[in-house]
Image (cartoon, rainbow, N blue to C red):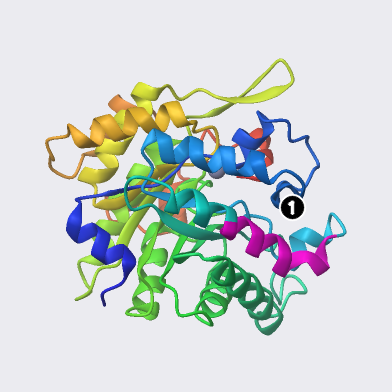
């Protein structure tokens, strides 16, 4: 299937995505507890400046400021009736910024999780969720989005609902999940599960992958796992890697990410060698990191799929669970021999949103 993403990947060997939205808006004055999406109406010039900072740093694909733009998340701020307005505005601002660039820049209409738990463990049903995602996706499309970008999901049910909602537009769809719990999402989903889900959605799905989570090493390990799992299918989705900028650390009452531009540059190269073709950063990733990633990818001599030892040596620790999966052991027990990942902590979870 040809679309705006696959066309761009015929012109260039990779698409560089952007970095963090939430953590960068905080540096522009957003306060903890504020809705970043309200800024699309209240501070459009700041949102535009954020978009342009990544376009100028070299991003070929930028996410709209709509991670929490579904009715469930907006309801926490009394904004449940502003889904259409805030999503359309966010996409419109990015559309203008992208159209002013001197090269093709894709407007990715960003959709994050509802924050609700699905039935039977929770109260949310698939139809209600799909309807909410469809509303957001259509508003993003109306604002000028080129594609729908679903991210930081943990459950298969939510991924299915978000995909169904996104497909009510005629835009290409990408989804990524956050593998942050010993080689799995919080809800137990592995890299192989993501590939199996993608196989169900093809050819209507364009890309899948991993974002956020517990650092760059774990995302690269997930990409290797996805690439391995994919060999059983005729058709491959475009693989997407969008790792956090290193590991979150608590310093003087603030979350900081310890990834240097050099580390993210190396991550970008290893993600490429693992099969990722859309590569970006998540929490903590600044325009300076993206510039380093662009230089690293432009000057990269592609290598073989990295071994786990190399990922650990270059980027840091890989969880026991992800390592077991790389060796073909897909059981939870295989990953839990030594307990959960040492990187998993309350602090990590706390920074999982806003991305
Ligand atoms: Zn993140």
Residue 331: image x %, image y %?
41, 59
Bounds of the magenta segment: 79-92
- Does the magenta run of residues contain 101? no
The answer to whether 44 is drawn above or below residue 164 in the figure is: above
User: Which of the four quarters of the rendered structure image does ligand 1 lie in?
Assistant: top right
Q: Secondary structure at mark 1?
A: helix
Q: Residue furthest top?
A: 252
Mark 1 is surrounded, within 10 Å at the Cα level, by few (under 14), some (14 to 19) or many (20 or more) other residues, namely: some
| The magenta stretch spans residue 83 | yes
Residue 255: quarter of image: top right
Nearest to the observer: residue 25 or residue 155: 25
Q: Circle 1 is placed at which residue position?
A: 41
Look at the image and tell me whether residue 188 can be seen: no
* Residue most extreme to the right: 78
Depth check, front residue: 55 or 348: 55
- Viewed as shown, does residue 284 lie left or right of 226? right
**Residue at 39% from the left image edge and 78% from the top image edge:** 201
């Amino acid at each position: 299937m040809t679309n705006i993403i696959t066309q761009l990947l015929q012109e260039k060997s990779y698409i560089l995505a952007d970095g963090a939205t939430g953590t960068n808006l905080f540096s522009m004055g957003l306060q903890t507890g504020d809705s970043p999406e309200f800024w699309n109406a209240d501070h459009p010039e700041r949102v535009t400046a954020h978009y342009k900072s990544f376009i100028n740093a070299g991003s070929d694909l930028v996410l709209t400021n709509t991670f929490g733009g579904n009715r469930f998340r907006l309801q926490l701020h009394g904004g449940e009736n502003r889904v259409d307005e805030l999503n359309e505005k966010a996409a419109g601002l990015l559309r203008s910024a992208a159209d002013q660039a001197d090269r093709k820049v894709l407007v990715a209409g960003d959709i994050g999780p509802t924050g609700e738990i699905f039935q039977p463990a929770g109260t949310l049903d698939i139809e209600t969720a799909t309807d909410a995602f469809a509303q957001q996706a259509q508003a993003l499309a109306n604002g000028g989005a080129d594609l729908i970008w679903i991210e930081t999901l943990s459950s298969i049910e939510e991924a299915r609902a978000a995909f169904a909602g996104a497909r009510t537009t005629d835009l290409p769809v990408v989804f990524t999940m956050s593998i942050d719990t010993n080689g799995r999402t919080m809800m137990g989903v592995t890299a192989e599960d993501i590939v199996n889900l993608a196989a169900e959605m093809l050819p209507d799905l364009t890309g899948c992958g991993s974002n956020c989570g517990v650092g760059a090493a774990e995302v690269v390990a997930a990409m290797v796992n996805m690439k391995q799992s994919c060999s059983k299918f005729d058709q491959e989705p475009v693989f997407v890697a969008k790792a956090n900028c290193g590991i979150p650390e608590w310093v003087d009452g603030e979350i900081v990410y310890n990834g240097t531009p050099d580390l993210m540059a190396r991550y970008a190269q290893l993600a490429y060698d693992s099969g990722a073709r859309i590569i970006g950063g998540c929490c903590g990733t600044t325009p300076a990191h993206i510039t380093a990633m662009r230089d690293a990818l432009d000057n990269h001599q592609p290598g073989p799929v990295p071994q786990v030892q190399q990922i650990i040596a270059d980027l840091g620790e890989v969880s026991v669970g992800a390592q077991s999966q790389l060796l073909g052991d897909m059981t939870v027990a295989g990953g839990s021999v030594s307990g959960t990942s040492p990187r998993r902590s309350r602090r990590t979870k706390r920074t999982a949103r806003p991305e």
